[in-house]
Image (spheres, rainbow, N blue to C red):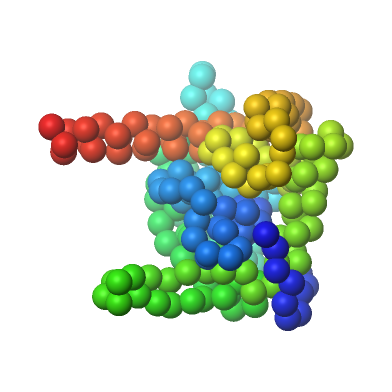
Amino acid sequence: MCRNRGQAYVGGMLIAEDLLLLLYDDETGKPITGSPGLDYALAGAVLIELTLSRKLDITIDGKVGRLQVLDGAPTGDAILDERLAYVVNKPGKKPKDQIGALSKRLRNQLLARLAERGVLEEDEGRVLGLFPVTRWPAKDARHEAEVRSKLESALKVGTTPDERTAALIALLSALNVVPKVVTDAVDKRALKQRAKEIADSDWAAAAVKKAVAEMQAAVTAAIVVASTAGASGSS
């Protein structure tokens, strides 16, 4: 559900910001999916942004993709520039080996900035009156509504998405949360299939699609590690 209050934010949003808005419930202010997937997806979105901006490329060395810096000059966006500088200092690394580091503090930085812009509201409280918790409900969801409109047009109507919308769909598909974002679809299996078709289509350059694939591999690997650790701890 989207709520419209206050003044709409005027200005460009990062793909990671759009993704974060989609992955947080407007009413409860809580994420609809857990870690590490959410955080790695945000890092993947930053890699995609930097690749679309021709700051980074992902070259294929044999069968292994490695990050290549095309332009290390600052973008003017503090969140992007922090991650770009990190890659500049560690060139030639596999993206999946960098996503963990790139994701550190990223979610909190994005949430804080969206709250400063009046898009989200920082709601501090306590669970059971003891444990501090922060929720991030929507304060002005008009930008999110526009993003959702483009998503639904591509996924439900079948229109051709623009590059940024396709990137979001690819990231959501990799996280397997498309039905959690587009909740009113009658046929969720068809919805997921349409998202996968878009993700697999020629919506972007090979390097950008490689960034999505690397994010998916990193999320899968992290989930396997977490599951293994959980199983060991319970044995």
Residue at horizontal 51 percent and vertical 34 percent from the top: 216
User: In terms of depth relative to the viewer, which is nearer, 110 or 189?
Assistant: 189
Q: Is residue 50 visible?
A: no
User: In terms of depth relative to the viewer, which is nearer, 235 or 159?
Assistant: 235
The correct choice, above or below, for 179 with respect to 217 in the image is below
Q: Percent x, y for residue 87? A: 48, 49
Q: Quadrant of the N terminus?
A: bottom right
- Count of residue discs: 0
Residue at horizontal 47 percent and vertical 69 percent from the top: 135
Q: Is residue 209 toward the left or the right of residue 81 in the image?
A: right
Considering every residue shown, the one lying at the far top of the view is: 62
Residue at horizontal 21 percent and vertical 33 percent from the top: 231
Q: Is residue 145 toward the left or the right of residue 224 in the image?
A: right
Residue at horizontal 52 percent and vertical 69 percent from the top: 136
Q: Percent x, y for residue 11? A: 76, 69
The correct choice, above or below, for 136 with respect to 233 in the image is below
Q: Is residue 234 visible?
A: yes
Res. 14 image quadrant: bottom right
Q: Is residue 202 toward the left or the right of residue 109 in the image?
A: right
The correct choice, above or below, for 178 with respect to 24 in the image is above
Considering every residue shown, the one lying at the far bottom of the view is: 6
Q: Percent x, y for residue 5? A: 72, 77
